[in-house]
Every structure is written in structure tokens, then in C-alpha cells.
């Protein structure tokens, strides 16, 4: 955790933000210096702190989250969320204390939360490693301020543990939430009509997300079963052409066949790694070979025997991708 306060630090931080799609207005805000400081919480999370007057009735703490470029294309991008929060604050005359940003972080955190729950982690620390900016926002809530987001799915998905935990923590702080898209929504709302609209909004967002995930999954499955790479990374011994189809890369394939021969001759995985490292042969990432690298290639990676797998129980044999014969 570090603070950014100087002009030079702001310039460097703004440059780092260039890697995020549709972040122009965020970079302008960072360079403007019209805030107290930026608190960097992790590689993907930070908070811009404007004021520490958190006990004023009109105080709001903003929150922005994007997980993929797809969300930017669907209108949930950084610029849209930031603009809506700033415009809403100006329209209502609120005192904006801070805005937390979790960029490139999924909203589906129930598995991580369950792991922390099973380890008896203090509930206040549940989001510290998972969504650091959200953790900052939740830890600064009190009865006089509210968390402000663009719309519900930026905070949670409907009907999951993440949403239940966030709502619980907000209410324990005697605070509330507010959405720029629909300011009527409140955790303390008792009006049945407003509560129903609240539920409909969440379920529409959840249906939209699930539909998108399903379409992407089906597309990746069809692509994988046609012999194309779907992970972005190609295994050692292969390369992919312009349309993503994988082929054997003979120089690396020869190294794999040599590993197999040495193993059959009685060499241990460590012996094989030591020989390759002594000869200056590197892995794809340019690092020395390890025992686990050799063992994975010779015993655990089906691709080297021509089998490509996708999901549970889905596999297809590609004879053109066979580098090794029977299992070593």
C-alpha cells in the first residue's frame, strides 16, 4: 500500500492506466491533482481520496469495478461509471469523499469468500485480498455516509454469497447504498413496489451475465474442438498460426522427445532438468527447467499425445499434434 501525491507520481500512475480500455477521463482526473491523494492498494486496485470528512450526512464513497473489456463494450466501462458517479454527486450536491477502483477483477467471489469463511477469517477482512478497493469502501462506511455505484452489478451478482456478505456489512455499519442508475434503491426500503423493482434490476443483470458467459463458453468449446487455441497460451512444443490453429514446433518437439528418451533410459526428472539447464535450453517463459516442468510434460499433459480437452469430460484426438507415443 502506498500513497501517490506528487506530480511526478501522478504522471507515472496515469501512464500505467493506459493499459485499461476507455480510461481517458480517469487519467485526466489523476493528472488534475484535484484530490488529496491516491492510495494504491494492489496492482489492480486503488482509491482516489478527495476528503476524509466521512461523518457528514451528504458524504458518499464511490465504487467502480470492471472485470473485462467486454463490460466496456456493453456500457459498463471505467469512463461511463466514473462519469455517472461524478454527475450524480454534482446533481445531488453530495460531498464525495473517495472513489475506489477494482479494475480487471471479477464480481463472482463466492468461492474465495467461502474459503475465507472456512478459515474463520474476520468478516471485515473478507474482501481485503479479493477486491481491495471494495474492502476500503466498506471499512469506511458509517451511519452518516453511503456507498455510491453506477448500478447493482458493479457491487455484486444476485443470489450469491458475495452479495449477501456486502449487504450484511453495509447494514452492520448502519449505512446504505445508492445507485446512480436508480437512486430509489435502499437496503432499508420497506415499500413493496420499490423493493420489487430492486429485485427485477438485479435479476436482469444476472440473466445478462449468465447469457454472456454461456455464449463465450460455447464459442470457446467449438474453437477448441476444431483444433484452435482458446487459452491464449501455447504449450511448449507448439505454435499457433494466424487463425489460432496449433501446430508442432519441431525444435521444441525434439527437446520433448529427448526428455522422453532420457526418462525411459532411467534418468530422474531432476537429471533431465539438470541436463537441459546445463545446455542452456529454456522453457517458453525463458526460465530454467524444474522437476515439475519435466514431470508435467511427460506424465500429465494430454496434448503431447494428441488429446485436447475442454471442460469436464470433453476431449478430442488430433493426430497432427502427437509428439509423444505411449505414456512415459
Image (cartoon, helix red, strand yellow):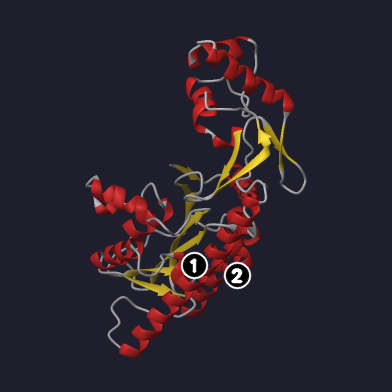
Which quadrant, please, contains the N terminus?
Answer: top left
Residue under pointer 2? 75
* Closer to the camera in the image, 76 or 64: 76
* Closer to the camera in the image, 286 or 99: 286
Classify mark 2: helix, strand or loop. Answer: helix
User: Horizontally, is 118 left or right of 152 in the view?
Assistant: left
Q: How far apart are marks 1 and 2 (CA)?
A: 17 Å
Could you say where residue 127 lies in the image, as x and y percent from the top left? 35, 52
Could you say where residue 128 lies in the image, as x and y percent from the top left? 36, 49
Residue located farthest toward the right when viewing the structure as drawn: 242
Question: Is mark 1 in CB contact (under 8 Å) with mark 2?
Answer: no
Q: In this view, does 264 lie above or below 117?
A: above
Residue under pointer 1? 210
Q: Which mark is residue 146?
A: none
Classify mark 1: helix, strand or loop. Answer: helix
Residue in view at x 36 percent, y 50 percent: 112
In primary-sequence order, the first of circles 1 and 2 is 2
* Labels 1, 2: front one: 1
* Closer to the camera in the image, 63 or 300: 300
Answer yes or no: is residue 119 visible. yes
Number of residue marks = 2
Residue in view at x 59 percent, y 23 percent: 287
Q: Is residue 152 above or below residue 4?
A: below
Could you say where residue 309 lies in the image, as x and y percent from the top left? 55, 45
- Classify residue 97 by image quadrant: bottom left
Residue located farthest toward the front when viewing the structure as drawn: 326
Residue in view at x 76 percent, y 42 percent: 241
Amino acid at each position: 500500500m502506498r500513497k501517490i501525491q506528487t506530480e511526478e507520481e501522478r504522471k507515472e500512475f496515469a501512464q500505467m492506466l493506459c493499459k485499461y480500455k476507455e480510461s481517458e477521463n480517469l487519467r485526466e482526473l489523476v493528472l488534475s491533482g484535484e484530490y488529496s491523494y491516491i492510495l494504491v492498494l494492489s496492482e489492480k486496485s486503488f482509491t482516489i481520496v478527495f476528503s476524509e470528512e466521512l461523518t457528514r450526512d451528504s458524504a458518499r464513497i464511490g465504487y467502480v469495478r470492471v472485470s473485462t473489456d467486454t463490460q466496456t463494450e456493453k456500457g459498463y466501462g471505467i469512463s461511463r461509471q466514473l462519469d455517472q458517479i461524478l454527475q450524480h454527486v454534482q446533481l445531488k450536491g453530495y460531498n464525495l469523499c473517495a472513489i475506489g477502483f477494482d479494475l480487471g477483477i471479477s464480481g463472482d467471489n463466492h468461492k474465495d469468500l467461502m474459503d475465507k469463511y472456512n478459515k474463520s477469517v474476520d468478516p471485515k477482512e473478507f474482501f481485503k485480498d479479493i477486491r481491495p478497493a471494495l474492502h476500503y469502501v466498506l471499512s469506511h462506511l458509517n451511519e452518516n455516509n453511503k456507498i455510491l455505484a453506477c448500478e447493482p452489478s458493479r457491487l455484486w451478482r444476485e443470489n450469491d454469497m458475495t452479495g449477501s456478505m456486502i449487504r450484511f456489512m453495509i447494514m452492520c455499519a448502519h449505512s446504505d447504498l445508492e445507485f446512480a442508475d436508480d437512486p430509489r434503491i435502499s437496503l432499508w426500503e420497506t415499500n413493496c413496489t420499490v423493493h420489487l423493482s430492486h429485485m427485477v434490476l438485479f435479476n436482469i443483470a444476472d440473466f445478462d451475465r449468465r447469457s454472456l458467459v454461456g455464449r463465450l463458453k460455447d464459442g470457446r468449446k467449438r474453437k477448441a474442438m476444431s483444433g484452435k487455441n482458446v487459452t491464449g497460451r501455447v504449450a511448449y512444443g507448439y505454435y499457433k498460426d494466424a487463425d489460432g490453429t496449433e501446430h508442432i514446433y519441431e525444435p521444441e518437439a525434439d527437446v520433448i522427445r529427448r526428455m522422453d528418451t532420457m526418462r525411459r533410459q532411467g534418468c530422474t526428472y531432476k537429471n533431465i532438468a539438470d541436463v537441459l539447464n546445463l545446455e542452456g535450453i529454456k522453457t517458453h517463459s525463458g526460465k530454467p527447467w524444474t522437476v515439475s516442468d519435466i514431470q508435467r510434460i511427460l506424465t500429465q499433459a494430454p496434448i503431447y499425445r494428441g488429446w485436447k480437452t475442454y471442460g469436464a469430460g470433453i476431449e478430442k484426438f488430433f493426430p497432427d499434434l502427437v509428439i509423444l507415443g505411449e505414456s512415459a
